[in-house]
Image: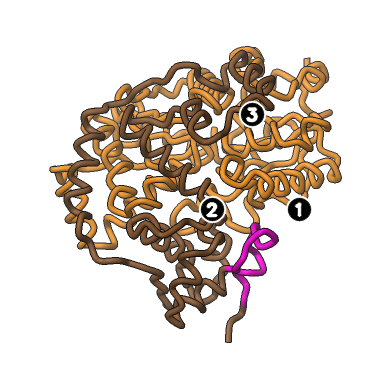
Amino acid sequence: MNKPLKIAIARAGEGKKLAYYPGCSLSSAGRPYDMSLKAVLKHLGIPFAEMKDWTCCGSFAAAAQDPLLAGVLPLSNLRLAAFDGCSDILIPCPECYSRFRKSLEDYSENGNLSRKMDDVLESHSPAAKPVHPLEIFSGFSPGEIKRDLSKIKAVCYYGCLLVRPPEISGVDDCENPRKMELILRACGMQTADWECRTDCCGGSLSISSPETEERLSETIIDSALEAGADCIVTACQMCQMNLEVCRKNRKKNLPVLYFTQIMGLAMGLKPSILGFGSNLVDAENLLKKVE
Amino acid sequence: MQCRKCGAGCPVSKESDILPHQVVHALRMGMKGTVLESRMIWLCPLCGTCNTRCPQGVDIMGAIENCRNTVLSEKINPGIPAAAGLAGAMLASIERRGRVYELGIVRAMKETKEILREFRLGLKMLYKGRLRLFPTSGDRLRVKKILKRTMEHTGKNSEKEGNTRVE
């Protein structure tokens, strides 16, 4: 078992609970991510407690309005998790994760801002530590592989927020991340190198500036197909959604999956509990190759 | 003299009116209007490429977010109204429910004919559970309190435009 996973389970055993913060997207747009992540955590025996009263991190909207608001919205959730006895908080959404990390960074670096944040929240209590799934599963190896994934070639798409800026999100190297490739290879899947591993998919531009987002997504899909990919594997629900529904992919039908879905397949979990039924681009042909 | 690594790596450079290095240059020259009225500050997806690659550690993303703050607080016409509108719609949802309700945003942002064009996709997403028909709510009381107290602080805050930190 890899070290980060051992640490996660050990801390859980010490009574230091792992809080789970889904964020606004995971229960809807990111449903396959939410389902597969929870299924994998349960299978590996990592206890977690989904926060009931979580509130939005604010995303780029709060930051556009007011930096103080952008700081307090995430911090209030971190303090709530700590108050409930959780030392760490698992945040699958890279946007949320990035905002949580930035909030803590601003709090520790800017004394003026931190005083205002404490005043708004009327507290000075400790905050839980944000953790991303790729951090816990870094170096993961499934032990016994229950499904042969060797006939599938995947390209790993990291996008922006997981790796940039390195001092805030830095889950992996910002120009040449490898964590997802290593996990997939440990699961027996082939991975191919390709150009667009850390290129931007456009994010929320799908709503505010769709033509730009279409161009960015099209470039990514084209590049993946050029690399001979059977699927794109990602760790961000915004990216996953954009790549699934872009005009190019409605013609090409390249499955866009989550790395947690692949982990689950390798460990023999049923595709239905890994959220494959919620994928918009059908992965049936892919699944037939591995059964 | 600018190295322009930021502009070279910017994913939206094709559609943008000004590039990241031009944002920095304009702000340093005191040409606030050029930046505040630009489409660039709203087209920027905050991908972080510019900040990560700048050899001088200039916080271009931070400058762009500060410009957005100024545009909204001083009620300047945003270069891309839809982007400012999206931020507004999300904040309204957060105020109301403590969370972002996507279907509500779509209704607020898109015209009926646009929604109807994507009707089939919308239905598929609903059927597959990728879109919630009804919203869920978080701790609304906590969020209302946060919003109120934040407004009290920021009410008469001095403007913070275009911070360029050269490290």
Q: Which chain is orange?
A: A
How far apart in space, not on screen, are marks 2 and 1 (Cα)? 30 Å
Residue topped by disc 3:
B113
Per the image, label 1 sits on a secondary structure element best described as loop
Q: Chain of mark 3?
A: B
Whether residue A63 sits left or right of residue A135 in the image: it is: left
Asked if marks 3 and 1 touch (Cβ < 8 Å), the reply is no
Residue topped by disc 1:
A195
How far apart in space, not on screen, are marks 2 and 3 (Cα)? 20 Å
The residue lying at 65 percent from left, 46 percent from top is: A201
Please tell me the numbered disc located at residue A44. none
Q: From the image, which quarter does the N terminus of chain A lie in? A: top right
Badge 2 amino acid: Ile
Above-or-below relation of A80 to B66: above
Between disc 3 and disc 1, the foreground one is: 3
Q: Are marks 2 and 3 on the same chain?
A: yes
Residue topped by disc 2:
B80
Report the magenta residues as a range: B4-19
Q: Are marks 3 and 1 on the same chain?
A: no
A273 within the magenta span:
no
Badge 1 amino acid: Glu
The residue lying at 77 percent from left, 22 percent from top is: A148
Q: Chain of mark 1?
A: A
Examine the rendering and report whether any part of residue A144 can be seen: no
Question: Is the stretch drawn in magenta largely helix, strand or loop?
Answer: loop
Q: Which chain is brown?
A: B
